[in-house]
Image: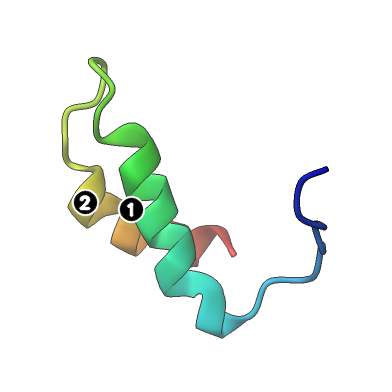
Amino acid sequence: MGPAITARNETDADLGTITDVTVAAFSPLEISNHTSNTSSRHCVPRTR
């Protein structure tokens, strides 16, 4: 079995990690215009 997964509400302290994961997930995609590095850092906080 894999590790246990715990779901919890996100906190302001999670913002950097959420942004890093978002950038990492989309940057290698062919359809990406590779601006997610800068735009995600502004977009992610606004979606919260």
Looking at the image, residue 47 lies above or below residue 33: below
Residue at the disc numbered 1:
40
**What count of labels does the image hold?**
2
Left/right placement of residue 14 relative to residue 3 reads left
Looking at the image, residue 15 lies above or below residue 38: below
Looking at the image, residue 34 lies above or below residue 11: above
Q: Residue at x 28, y 22 (%)?
A: 29
Q: Can you say which quadrant of the picture contains the N terminus?
A: top right
Q: Residue 7, located in which quarter of the rendered image? A: bottom right
Q: Position of residue 38 (x, y in %)?
A: 20, 55
Q: Residues under labels 1 and 2: Cα distance?
A: 6 Å
Q: Is residue 30 visible?
A: yes
The disc at residue 14 is none
Q: Position of residue 13 (x, y in %)?
A: 53, 84
In front here: 33 or 20?
20
Q: Helix, strand or loop at disc 1? A: helix
Q: Residue 35, located in which quarter of the rendered image? A: top left
Mark 1 touches mark 2? (CB < 8 Å): yes
Q: Residue at x 45, y 67 (%)?
A: 17
Q: Position of residue 40 (x, y in %)?
A: 33, 53
Q: Can you say which quadrant of the picture contains the C terminus?
A: bottom right
- The amino acid type of the residue labelled 2 equals Asn
Mark 2: give few (<14), some (14-19) or many (20+) Cα within 10 Å: some
Left/right placement of residue 34 relative to residue 36 reads left
Q: Helix, strand or loop at disc 2? A: helix
The disc at residue 37 is 2
- The amino acid type of the residue labelled 1 equals Ser
Q: Position of residue 39 (x, y in %)?
A: 26, 51
Left/right placement of residue 32 relative to residue 24 reads left
